[in-house]
Amino acid sequence: MSFYKRTKRIMDEKAFEDLVKKEKEKLYRIAFLYVKNENDALDIVQETIYKAFTSIETLREVKYFSTWITRILINNALDFLKKQKKILLSDEIDKINNLNNEKAEDKIDLVNAVKRLKEPYKTAIILRFYKDFTIKQIANILDCPEGTVKTYIHRGIYKLKLDLGKEYVK
């Protein structure tokens, strides 16, 4: 390998490292929402970073790095859950379980209802309402049209209303 190629590769690795540093906390939080286990979430983030690094040439523009790596993370988390046959968690139930008021019970009901949603409604609801992603960002992550994301969200909300009863979801 020539000096030029080695130098360019080192510079590219540094740029990749800088981009990952900006995203790592968000990636961990999303992974944790899926697996509800610190070690599993860290493993998923590590696997995501590895896959992103080895396939960085598929990224068309740096400005899409965040949504691109988030899509990789979600796919890794879903693959992990399929392999482990675990239930998808969408919020920190342990914290809520420690609360003894009626609102906490409503939150537990909502969290459990979100867990019962089928993919891709669950992912769309989590990204939109728990992580505050825009419709466009979710469309990029799920690699589908924005109209499809809107449909997933509206159908997910409808299913939550049916599951919880109209008094919970407004």
Image (cartoon, rainbow, N blue to C red):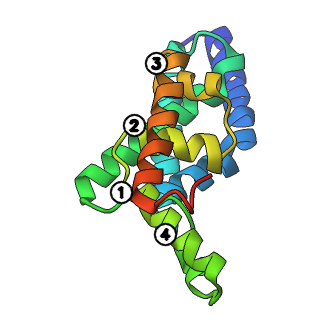
Foreground mark, 4 or 2, reads 4
Question: What crowding class fits label 4: few (fewer than 14 Cα within 10 Å), some (14-19), or many (20 or more)?
Answer: some
Q: Relative to 57, say whether 161 is above or below.
A: below
Q: Position of residue 36 (x, y in %)?
A: 48, 66
| Dot 3: element | loop
Q: Position of residue 138 (x, y in %)?
A: 57, 29
For disc 4, the marked residue is 109
Question: What crowding class fits label 1: few (fewer than 14 Cα within 10 Å), some (14-19), or many (20 or more)?
Answer: some
Of mark 1 and mark 4, the one earlier in the sequence is 4
For disc 3, the marked residue is 144
Of mark 4 and mark 3, the one earlier in the sequence is 4
Of mark 3 and mark 2, the one earlier in the sequence is 2
Q: Position of residue 84 (x, y in %)?
A: 26, 59
Of mark 1 and mark 3, the one earlier in the sequence is 1
The kind of residue tagged 4 is Asp
* Distance between the alpha carbons at the discs numbered 4 and 3: 30 Å
- The residue sitting at 54% across, 26% down in the picture is 150
For disc 1, the marked residue is 116
Q: Relative to 78, say whether 101 is above or below.
A: below
For disc 2, the marked residue is 120
Q: Is residue 152 left or right of residue 64?
A: left
Question: What crowding class fits label 2: few (fewer than 14 Cα within 10 Å), some (14-19), or many (20 or more)?
Answer: few
- The residue sitting at 72% across, 22% down in the picture is 11
Q: Quadrant of residue 119?
A: top left
- Are the two marked residues, 3 and 2, in contact with CB atoms closer than 8 angstroms? no
| Dot 4: element | helix
